[in-house]
Structure formats: structure tokens, C-alpha cells
Amino acid sequence: MTVRQTLQTCALLCLGVACSPREPGTPEVTGAGWIDVTATLDPARTPVYEGDAPLKFDFLKDMRKGDRLTLSVYALGAHSGTHIDAPMHFVASGASIDQVALAPLIGPARVIDIPDSVRAIDAGELNRHDWRGATRVLFRTRSTLRGWMDSSAFHRDFTYVAPDAAQLLADAGVVLVGVDYISAEQFGAPAPRTHQILLGRGIPIVEGLDLRPVQAGDYDLVVLPLKVRGHEAAPARAIVRKRT
């Protein structure tokens, strides 16, 4: 077969695949029903963890000021807003954010409501909720109730996942843990045991979710980080859809 014949054959095969009818009963992929649970990045409103890099957004060119186009520049930390921690964050040999597999980032997730009065999600608190059997767990806490992911002030008294609860989640086979503030670890903890337990088992941690639009229950989750080579975290876009 000549090169020209090979190219013609490949073109016909590709055309056939592209034009193939959808399998009967296969739902079309649309945006219907999906809810955005990503915190909006805004230097005036996005909280920044104490000591982390501030957000700086600027326009290099701006059509509102007479330029022919609009062109922006962003400067921010890897842990800004809604983001994903990869194992490399606290595990020396751990995977970087570009190496985190898609499997834990897409699939069924359970949103669990934690009362406003609870500061520590320890094993006792965790077991007061219906979490067993969930593949991915997202905690909706006082941070959601108080709108803290939409407030520039950094709050040290956010609700955190205690190490004993992290161990229970890891041992039960949970593949992703999410929280609604910019860290899953207690502020000022003597050691980052929660991160070490989860990331040490290869479990990505989604931090900084804005769970105000949803209630407790079971959802489909898609959360995808920017693909940044060789670093420990990256901002992400997170969406959920109520499971029926």
C-alpha cells in the first residue's frame, strides 16, 4: 500500500468513527444538572492561608482603556482557592500534581454536613455520619455556613480533619477527600499527620471547595487540576451533579 493509499484509508476510518451513531440508550454529555462548587478566584475576596503567596491579577492590555485587545497576567500560589494537594506536598517521593491519575478525581462522592459547632472531624465525629461505603467524601462545614471561601479574611478556626479520621477514611478505601476551606489540617498542628496519612496512601485532597450551592447527599464529582509539571498542588475546577 502506498503512502497516499494509507492516508486515504486512515481518513475513511476516522470519518467512520466520527460519524458512527451513538449507542442506543447512551445519554448525551451536556452541562445539565452540574453545579459549580469552585471558589471564584478574586484577590479582593479569596482567602489566602497565612504565610502563603497573595493573589495578584492585572491587565497588560485592556479594551476598556482603549487597547485593541484584553490581555491578563495572574500571579498566585499553588494552593489558591479550590485546589488539589498531590502526594508530593508532604511525601518526599510522592507523585506531583501532573502525575495524579484521573480515576480518583472523577466519580461518585458523598457530601457530609458537619455542624457549625464542630471544629475537629475526628473519628468519633466521622462515625456519627453515614460515610461508610462512599468512594469520595466531601465535608461541608462551618466554612460553608459562614461563606469563608468568599471572604478575604483568613480564619484560623476552620474545621479540620483529624488524623484518626483520616486513618479511618484511608483504611476504608476512600480515594479522595475534600474540604470547604483552604486546608484539611488543623491550623498550627504540631505535625501534618492528616496530610501525611492521606497523601501517603496516594489519596488526593481537594481543599477550598465552595459547597454553598449543595446539600448533604450523593453526587457525581469531576474535579480537575491545572496540569503543572513537577509541583505539589494546583488550582482546580470542581463540579458536582446530584445522583438519582
Image: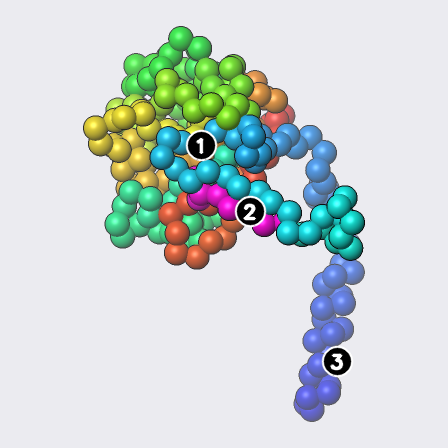
* Numbered tag placed on residue 74 in the rendering: 2
User: Percent from the top left, x then y, of residue 144?
Assistant: 51, 19
Mark 1 or 3 closer to N-term? Answer: 3
Magenta segment boundaries in residue numbering: 72-79
Q: Secondary structure at mark 3?
A: helix
Helix, strand or loop at label 2? It is strand
Label 1 sits on what residue type? Val
- The one nearer the camera, 151 or 118, is 151
Residue at 44%, 10% in the rendered image = 116
Q: Is residue 182 left or right of residue 210?
A: left
Residue 102 placement, left or right of 69: left
Q: Quadrant of residue 211?
A: top right
Residue 36, given in percent of the width and then of the height, sits at 62, 32
Work out how far the residue at label 3 is from the one at label 2, CA to CA, in angstroms: 45 Å
Q: Residues within 10 Å of mark 3 (few under 14, many from 20)?
A: few
For the image, the number of numbered tags is 3
Residue visible at 37% across and 17% down?
A: 157
Which is closer to the viewer, label 3 or label 2?
A: 2
According to the image, label 1 marks what residue?
48
Query: Can I make out residue 106 in this image?
Result: no
The residue lying at 56 percent from left, 30 percent from top is 44
- Judged from this view, the residue extending furthest toward the front is 65
Q: How dense is the environment of label 1, judged by Cα within 10 Å: few (below 14), some, or many (20 and up)?
A: many
Q: Residue furthest left?
A: 190
Disc 3 to disc 2: CB gap under 8 Å: no
Left or right side of 164 for 99 = right
Residue 233 percent coordinates (x, y): 42, 45
Residue designated by label 3: 8
Q: Is residue 47 above or below residue 24?
A: above
Q: Quadrant of the C terminus?
A: top right
